[in-house]
Amino acid sequence: METNVVFEQKISVSPREFNALASQKLDALLLKKFEEENAGRCSVHGWVKPGTMKMLSRSMLQIEGGRFTGDMVSWLQVEGTVIYPVDGAHITGIVLKKNKMGMFVMHQEAIQVMVPRDLHIGNEEFDNIQIGETVEVEIKKSRFKEKDPTILSVGIYIKKVGGMRPILPAAPAAPAPVFNEGEEEETNEEEEEETNEEEEEEEEANEEEANEEEEANEEEQEEENAPIRLAIDSEEAGGVLGGSMPPIEYTGPVENNW
């Protein structure tokens, strides 16, 4: 599955990146930029294996017209190793995940193989596989796009190869705090006092909110029950009715059905 291929790609170098030429050669700078863009990713030829790049040739640096960025470009020919899975190939990998649907097997961080459980019903060896064990699978179908981090494949379980392997290094345990005599009790008392103060502040805030709500409700009820007073001036009434009359006053409860 591993083959050597030749890449042809245009690499651009910005004016700021030219400062690195004080400590390294131009070929090394161009090859480093090529590896950053392609190594550990999928290309049209397959998954590019890191650390296998070797420059064969390059063109002279030139300014690309119409861009006005100050970048200079160069065409590179680089040879590297790629991993391309073929149908029927047998590979080994570590079991990353397992559930009722099946399991995922990773091969060299390049190929992620999905092994469905429906194809292995009744296989006790398949059911007893644990996460972290090394198994051998047969690839049936693969799919990837350019710049993908891994190749996705579907395969069939063949056999168990090795035992358990750690997938990720265990995180170091946090050191326990060291207290002198009497310090632990003081810290506990301080924590209790802080918690009590916080609880008291919360209770006071809740009481203030409840009091404000009660005052607002009382004001609304007073406004609803307040009597209405209508007064008509005697002169205005006289002008309307054709004579003079005393002012009319009405005092009564407010009704909402107007």
Image (cartoon, grey):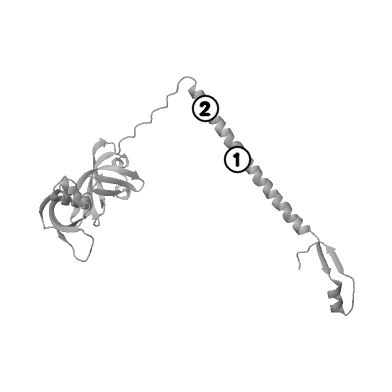
In-front residue for pair 244/118? 244
For label 1, the SS is helix
Q: Are marks 2 and 1 in contact (CB under 8 Å)?
A: no
Q: Quadrant of residue 178?
A: top left
Label 1 Cα crowd, 10 Å radius (few <14 / some 14-19 / many 20+): few
Image spot of residue 177 (x, y percent): 42, 27
Question: Which label belongs to residue 112?
Answer: none
Reply above or below: 74 against 258: above
Across and down, in percent, residue 96 comes to 30, 43
Q: Type of residue at label 2?
A: Asn
- How far apart are the two marked residues, 2 and 1, measured between alpha carbons? 21 Å
* Crowding at mark 2 (Cα within 10 Å: few <14, some 14-19, many 20+): few
User: Is 228 positioned to the left or the right of 170 in the image?
Assistant: right
Q: Secondary structure at mark 2?
A: helix
> Counting residues from the N terminus, which is met first, the one under dot 2 or under dot 1?
2
Q: Is residue 92 above or below residue 62?
A: above
What residue does disc 2 label?
A: 188
Extreme-left residue of the structure = 56
The residue where tag 1 is placed is: 202
Dot 1 amino acid type: Glu
Is residue 62 something that shows in the picture? yes
Residue 239: x, y in percent? 85, 78
Residue drawn at (48%, 23%), measured in percent from left and top?
183
User: Considering depth in this image, is 98 or 26 the residue closer to the camera?
Assistant: 26
Count numbered badges in the picture.
2
What quarter of the picture does the C terminus occupy?
Answer: bottom right
| Residue 102 appears left or right of 111 | right
In the picture as drawn, the residue positioned furthest to the top comes out as 181
The extreme bottom residue here reads 242
Q: Quick one: which residue is furthest to the front in this view?
A: 235
- Left or right of 38 on screen, residue 122: right
Residue 88 visible at all = no
